[in-house]
Image (cartoon, rainbow, N blue to C red):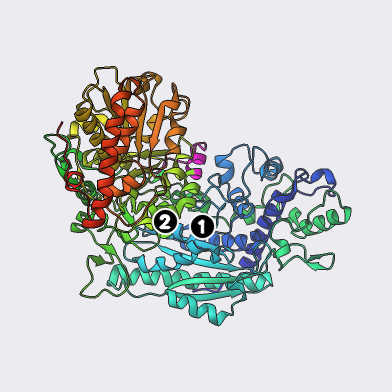
Amino acid sequence: MQEISEKTIEKINSYWQAVNYLSAGQIYLQANPLLKNPLIPADIKPRLLGHWGTSPGLNLVYVHLNRLIKDTNADILYVCGPGHGAPAIVAHTYLEGTYTELFPEITMDEEGMLKLFRQFSTPGGIPSHVSAHTPGSINEGGELGYSLMHAFGAVFDHPNLIAACVIGDGEAETGPLAASWNSVVFLNPARDGAVLPILHLNGYKIASPTIFSRMDDTALNELFRGYGYEVFFVEGEDPHHVHRQMSSTLDIVYDKIRKIQYNARAEGMIHQRKWPMIILRTPKGWTGPKSWNNLPIEGSFRSHQVPLAGVKENPEKLQALELWMRSYEPEKLFDEQGKLNAELRSMSPAGNKRMSALPYANGGVLLKDLILPDFKNYGIKIKHPGVTEAESTRNLGKFLREIFTMNAANKNFRLFCPDETNSNRLEAVFQVTDRCFMEKIIDTDDQLSPDGRVMEVLSEHLCEGWLEGYLLTGRHGLFPCYEAFVTIVDSMVSQHAKWLKTTQEIPWRKPIASLNYLLTSHVWRQDNNGYSHQGPGFIDTVVNKKSSVIRIYLPPDANTLLSVMDHCLRSKNYVNVVVAGKQPELQWLGMDEAVAHCEKGASVWEWAGNDSGKPDVILACAGDVPTLETIAAAEMLHTYLPGLQVRVVNVVDLMSLSPKAYHAHGMSEEYFNDLFTDAAPVIFAFHGYVRIIHDLVHGRPDSARFHVRGFMEEGTTTTPFDMVVLNQMSRYHLAMEAVKHVPRFQQKADEFIRTCEEKLSIHKEYIRIHLDDMPEIKDWKFKG
């Protein structure tokens, strides 16, 4: 390893000064971008927004990684964890030329530099955090905690990629980031790339000190060695000293990464590791104003956002700002036209080796369509609706097994699951793959190997973050989860949905594979685990996201589940939520019927009703358990009140209920009226919280006629049927509600309601004596 020359150090420092200047300029200036004239108040933006404190450290790492790329020709992805680091990263993408290539109006001259400054954190411009607008980024900086898990997800199955992940010391205090250090246990150096964590300790969050920055080096070293890392420290306040340290340290850790990979790939030593990481200690707001009014700025929390506020109004502060910005000597860095001088331009890698132009950071460029078997081959044969029982997700597991097999050569599909693959009845995948694990494996372990493609870890955050990183870099995956606990990642899916919505507005961002959820252990069949496991709120989180991005499916049986999942795995740029039970349940539709039903999103199940085109009442349903109760209610009404005209409508695509103007899957007015008429009362049994259905049908003809039953936050450890009774969504409740809304049956309604109430009373007593549901409920089959 050759020691870096002093001349190279000087060039690195000059480049660092250039990006620091551009970072500060984005925060402050709306005119006079090269300081050709003394600063005046009119040069300053009316609203000073942005974050300076983290920018010098981010710039330091970036320029040194550029040097490493130039020397080694490595593919390095820069993952920016510190939240509002956009001034720094945007500055680099601009100097590398990528920004101008993608946004031609931001030219590499004085006029373009001014536009770069003026667009930052202003109306019609770009956010103050690294976002989808930022070339080279896969990590939205608006919410902290996800950078390291994104980095690991990015390098799974990308053996040539190194993800250099800068983690802010504020971000390091979040729960998701704290769990992310464990990702190293799932990184296989024989087939995966590498992650280089760079923990940047600059001392402060917005106003408080950070935990790690107050720990000494010995404690930090012990902590991270325990996680599985070899720690290298780079620290100081003198730029040249830190540049030299950083340069030599990067050479060392790069060699260690390549040695680990060589030993794994050539020698089979896959368990030999401690993966290197860097802990970087530099002052917050480094090279910025030292102090103001006898209070420190550099090295303190006061540099976190805008170090000098009120410069437009305060002449002394304006002078201090000018002294600060002139300290970078822009006249030496940029020529008269505003272009970076030629010697410094040579510091940047070329073409796709630029971190801002790396194909991995625009995953749709690399995306290969998933090879899918014909899902119809895995269907269940149905001779008569509501007689055959099956575990729908167990059948799906066979379909997923073949997906693993057919895509083995492409290495572009993984299952990310919080320790629930068997529990969710997807164990067929273990016939062709294992759970990934890089720690010690003992004889009594089941289906563990370093080569496994099922990622099981008891952290919903990690599953979500790994999958996001995997998708954003051009691959496919599925996240099966217990419904109640997928809400742990509510905020993460919100951020990903916002990212997708934004990328749809950016032509150069190519579509990526959809983020697919399978919620199998759902609210209605968590009767054994009880109230803590009973919550369908994830649907509420997703349904409120941009309609161009979200899709929600509630397949009622195995064949509709196969059809829906095939569709989701083929789709791009969506968040798809599929809710389907794992317990033995009645099957309703043959495969051809299931496909036709899913294509429509909702349809009349004529075999379950008895109306002749003019129903007295409509029983509608969405979800597997609501479907069971709805069809049982319809059969009860046929038996007790044979003159009552009942129609049954099943909804598999939840968003189809929405008017077409609000969602691409929304039904036309004509089709909605075909299903629900324009006047008949609708008793709707819904999987989740009732408000959603009312919101979706708002604006439809006489939407007040929709009477929705769903989860009412009534839960406990009880029998399956008692769950629907507690929430007043049982077949008895649905049937009673139906007759109440048909005036011509009011004389017969009282007697029928008494019958239903008596059944409910018997049920309540029966389950407390026998600890199980009544046989007429438990063994019910559809007679037709």
Q: Residue 99 carries which label?
A: none
- The residue at 17%/47% (across/down) is 775
Kindly report the secondary structure that dominates the magenta region of the rendered protein.
Answer: loop
Q: Check residue 154 in the rendering and tell me which mark sits there, or answer none.
A: 2
Residue occupying the point 45% across, 57% down = 150
Horizontal side of residue 348 vs 394, given as left or right? right
Q: Is residue 516 above or below residue 9?
A: above
Identity of the residue furthest to the bottom in this view: 218
Residue 142 visible in the current orientation: yes
Q: Is 609 situated left or right of 330 in this image?
A: left
Residue type of the residue flagged with mark 1: Val
Q: Is residue 679 left or right of residue 283?
A: left
Marker count (numbered):
2
Q: In which quarter of the image is the C terminus?
A: top left
Q: Is residue 527 above or below residue 657?
A: below
Question: Are the residues at dot 2 and dot 1 in contact (C-beta closer than 8 Å)?
Answer: yes
In the visual, does 310 lie left or right of 569?
right
Three-letter code for the amino acid on which mark 2 is drawn: Ala
Q: Where is residue 205 in the image (x, y as percent from the top left)?
A: 64, 64
Q: How crowded is mark 2: few (under 14 residues within 10 Å), some or many (20 or more)?
A: many
How far is disc 2 from disc 1 in space, using C-alphas?
A: 10 Å
Disc 1 secondary structure class: strand
In this rendered view, identify the residue nearer to me: 217 or 172.
172
What residue is disc 1 on?
A: 79
Which span of residues is magenta-colored?
A: 498-512
Residue at image point 52% right, 69% down = 250
The answer to whether 770 is drawn above or below residue 199 in the figure is: above
